[in-house]
Image: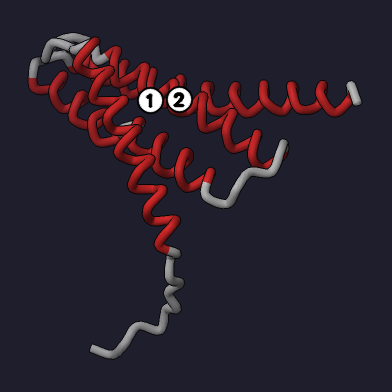
Amino acid sequence: MGGSSRVTERVPLDVVAVVALGGVLGAEARYGAGRVWSTAAEAFPWTTLTINVVGCLVIGVFLVAITEGRPAHRLVRPFFGTGVLGGFTTFSTYCVDVQRLLNHGQSAKAVGYLALTLAAALAAVAGGAGATRWVLRRGAGAR
Protein backbone atom coordinates (compact mmCIF):
# COMPACT_ATOMS: atom_id res chain seq x y z
CA MET A 1 0.00 0.00 0.00
CA GLY A 2 2.85 2.35 -0.63
CA GLY A 3 2.53 5.63 -2.44
CA SER A 4 2.71 5.88 -6.17
CA SER A 5 6.14 6.53 -7.61
CA ARG A 6 4.58 8.04 -10.70
CA VAL A 7 4.83 11.80 -10.97
CA THR A 8 1.55 13.40 -11.93
CA GLU A 9 1.30 16.71 -13.68
CA ARG A 10 -1.47 19.09 -12.78
CA VAL A 11 -3.59 20.06 -15.74
CA PRO A 12 -4.33 23.79 -15.77
CA LEU A 13 -7.96 24.63 -15.04
CA ASP A 14 -8.35 26.56 -18.30
CA VAL A 15 -7.43 23.41 -20.26
CA VAL A 16 -9.96 21.34 -18.31
CA ALA A 17 -12.60 24.01 -18.96
CA VAL A 18 -12.06 24.19 -22.72
CA VAL A 19 -12.01 20.39 -23.05
CA ALA A 20 -15.30 20.22 -21.14
CA LEU A 21 -16.87 22.98 -23.23
CA GLY A 22 -15.66 21.41 -26.46
CA GLY A 23 -16.89 18.00 -25.33
CA VAL A 24 -20.37 19.38 -24.72
CA LEU A 25 -20.45 20.95 -28.19
CA GLY A 26 -19.16 17.81 -29.91
CA ALA A 27 -21.54 15.50 -28.04
CA GLU A 28 -24.48 17.79 -28.82
CA ALA A 29 -23.55 17.74 -32.51
CA ARG A 30 -23.37 13.93 -32.47
CA TYR A 31 -26.68 13.69 -30.62
CA GLY A 32 -28.28 16.04 -33.14
CA ALA A 33 -26.98 14.00 -36.07
CA GLY A 34 -28.35 10.84 -34.46
CA ARG A 35 -31.76 12.44 -34.04
CA VAL A 36 -31.87 13.72 -37.62
CA TRP A 37 -30.54 10.50 -39.17
CA SER A 38 -31.69 7.79 -36.78
CA THR A 39 -30.98 4.12 -37.54
CA ALA A 40 -33.34 1.19 -36.96
CA ALA A 41 -32.00 -1.58 -34.69
CA GLU A 42 -31.40 -4.06 -37.51
CA ALA A 43 -30.22 -1.48 -40.07
CA PHE A 44 -26.65 -0.62 -41.00
CA PRO A 45 -25.48 2.19 -38.66
CA TRP A 46 -24.68 4.77 -41.33
CA THR A 47 -24.99 7.70 -38.93
CA THR A 48 -22.33 6.44 -36.51
CA LEU A 49 -20.07 5.46 -39.41
CA THR A 50 -20.43 8.91 -40.97
CA ILE A 51 -19.83 10.71 -37.67
CA ASN A 52 -16.67 8.74 -36.96
CA VAL A 53 -15.28 9.07 -40.49
CA VAL A 54 -15.99 12.81 -40.64
CA GLY A 55 -14.40 13.23 -37.21
CA CYS A 56 -11.29 11.37 -38.37
CA LEU A 57 -11.07 13.47 -41.53
CA VAL A 58 -11.35 16.68 -39.51
CA ILE A 59 -8.76 15.59 -36.92
CA GLY A 60 -6.34 14.77 -39.75
CA VAL A 61 -6.80 18.25 -41.22
CA PHE A 62 -6.78 19.97 -37.84
CA LEU A 63 -3.67 18.40 -36.35
CA VAL A 64 -1.56 19.02 -39.45
CA ALA A 65 -2.86 22.58 -39.72
CA ILE A 66 -1.93 23.47 -36.14
CA THR A 67 1.35 21.54 -35.96
CA GLU A 68 2.75 22.15 -39.43
CA GLY A 69 0.86 25.27 -40.48
CA ARG A 70 0.05 28.36 -38.51
CA PRO A 71 0.69 28.17 -34.80
CA ALA A 72 -2.49 28.13 -32.73
CA HIS A 73 -3.29 29.38 -29.26
CA ARG A 74 -2.41 26.74 -26.64
CA LEU A 75 -6.10 26.11 -25.86
CA VAL A 76 -7.18 25.45 -29.46
CA ARG A 77 -5.94 21.86 -29.55
CA PRO A 78 -7.52 20.74 -26.26
CA PHE A 79 -10.76 22.59 -27.08
CA PHE A 80 -11.23 21.36 -30.62
CA GLY A 81 -9.14 18.19 -30.87
CA THR A 82 -9.84 16.63 -27.49
CA GLY A 83 -13.11 18.35 -26.64
CA VAL A 84 -15.18 18.92 -29.77
CA LEU A 85 -13.88 16.02 -31.85
CA GLY A 86 -13.59 13.71 -28.85
CA GLY A 87 -17.21 14.44 -27.98
CA PHE A 88 -18.35 14.17 -31.60
CA THR A 89 -16.75 10.85 -32.49
CA THR A 90 -17.86 7.75 -30.64
CA PHE A 91 -16.08 4.45 -30.20
CA SER A 92 -18.60 3.29 -27.60
CA THR A 93 -21.58 3.71 -29.94
CA TYR A 94 -19.58 1.91 -32.63
CA CYS A 95 -19.22 -1.06 -30.26
CA VAL A 96 -22.88 -0.92 -29.23
CA ASP A 97 -23.90 -0.83 -32.91
CA VAL A 98 -21.87 -3.99 -33.58
CA GLN A 99 -23.47 -5.73 -30.59
CA ARG A 100 -26.93 -4.59 -31.70
CA LEU A 101 -26.40 -6.01 -35.18
CA LEU A 102 -25.18 -9.30 -33.71
CA ASN A 103 -28.19 -9.46 -31.39
CA HIS A 104 -30.46 -9.08 -34.43
CA GLY A 105 -28.77 -11.93 -36.29
CA GLN A 106 -26.92 -9.56 -38.63
CA SER A 107 -23.42 -11.01 -38.18
CA ALA A 108 -22.27 -10.31 -41.75
CA LYS A 109 -23.47 -6.73 -41.44
CA ALA A 110 -21.69 -6.41 -38.06
CA VAL A 111 -18.37 -7.67 -39.45
CA GLY A 112 -18.74 -5.44 -42.51
CA TYR A 113 -19.41 -2.47 -40.27
CA LEU A 114 -16.35 -3.26 -38.13
CA ALA A 115 -14.10 -3.47 -41.18
CA LEU A 116 -15.61 -0.53 -43.06
CA THR A 117 -15.38 1.78 -40.05
CA LEU A 118 -11.74 0.91 -39.43
CA ALA A 119 -10.73 1.26 -43.09
CA ALA A 120 -12.74 4.42 -43.72
CA ALA A 121 -11.59 6.12 -40.50
CA LEU A 122 -7.92 5.40 -41.19
CA ALA A 123 -8.29 6.53 -44.81
CA ALA A 124 -10.07 9.70 -43.69
CA VAL A 125 -7.41 10.75 -41.17
CA ALA A 126 -4.61 9.95 -43.64
CA GLY A 127 -6.43 11.71 -46.48
CA GLY A 128 -7.19 14.78 -44.37
CA ALA A 129 -3.60 15.00 -43.14
CA GLY A 130 -2.17 14.43 -46.62
CA ALA A 131 -4.45 16.96 -48.29
CA THR A 132 -3.65 19.55 -45.64
CA ARG A 133 0.09 19.00 -46.05
CA TRP A 134 -0.32 19.40 -49.82
CA VAL A 135 -2.22 22.68 -49.35
CA LEU A 136 0.38 23.96 -46.88
CA ARG A 137 3.24 23.10 -49.26
CA ARG A 138 1.51 24.84 -52.15
CA GLY A 139 0.92 27.90 -49.98
CA ALA A 140 4.55 27.95 -48.86
CA GLY A 141 5.73 27.59 -52.46
CA ALA A 142 3.61 30.53 -53.61
CA ARG A 143 5.40 32.94 -51.29
Question: Residue at the spot x=59%, y=24% of the render?
Answer: 128
Q: Front-most of 78 and 119?
A: 78
Q: How is the image coloured?
A: secondary structure
Please report contact status of discs 1 and 2: CB closer than 8 Å, yes or no. yes
Q: Amino acid at mark 1?
A: Asn
Residue most extreme to the left: 104
Give the number of the mark in front: 1 or 2. 1
Which class describes the residues within 10 Å of circle 1: few (<14), some (14-19), or many (20+)? many
Mark 2 sits on what residue?
A: 121
Give whichever of discs 1 and 2 has the lower sequence position: 1
The C terminus, quarter of image:
top right
**Up/down of 64 relative to 131, above or below:** below
Q: Front-most of 95 and 27?
A: 27
Question: Residue at the spot x=60%, y=22% of the render?
Answer: 127
Question: Residue at the spot x=16%, y=19% of the render?
Answer: 101
**Up/down of 68 relative to 4, above or below:** above
- State the count of labels: 2
Query: Picture coordinates of residue 57 (x, y %)?
Result: 51, 24
* Circle 2: element type: helix
Mark 1 sits on what residue?
A: 52
Q: Front-most of 106 and 91?
A: 91
* Circle 1: element type: helix
Which class describes the residues within 10 Å of circle 2: few (<14), some (14-19), or many (20+)? many
Q: Is residue 58 left or right of residue 40?
A: right
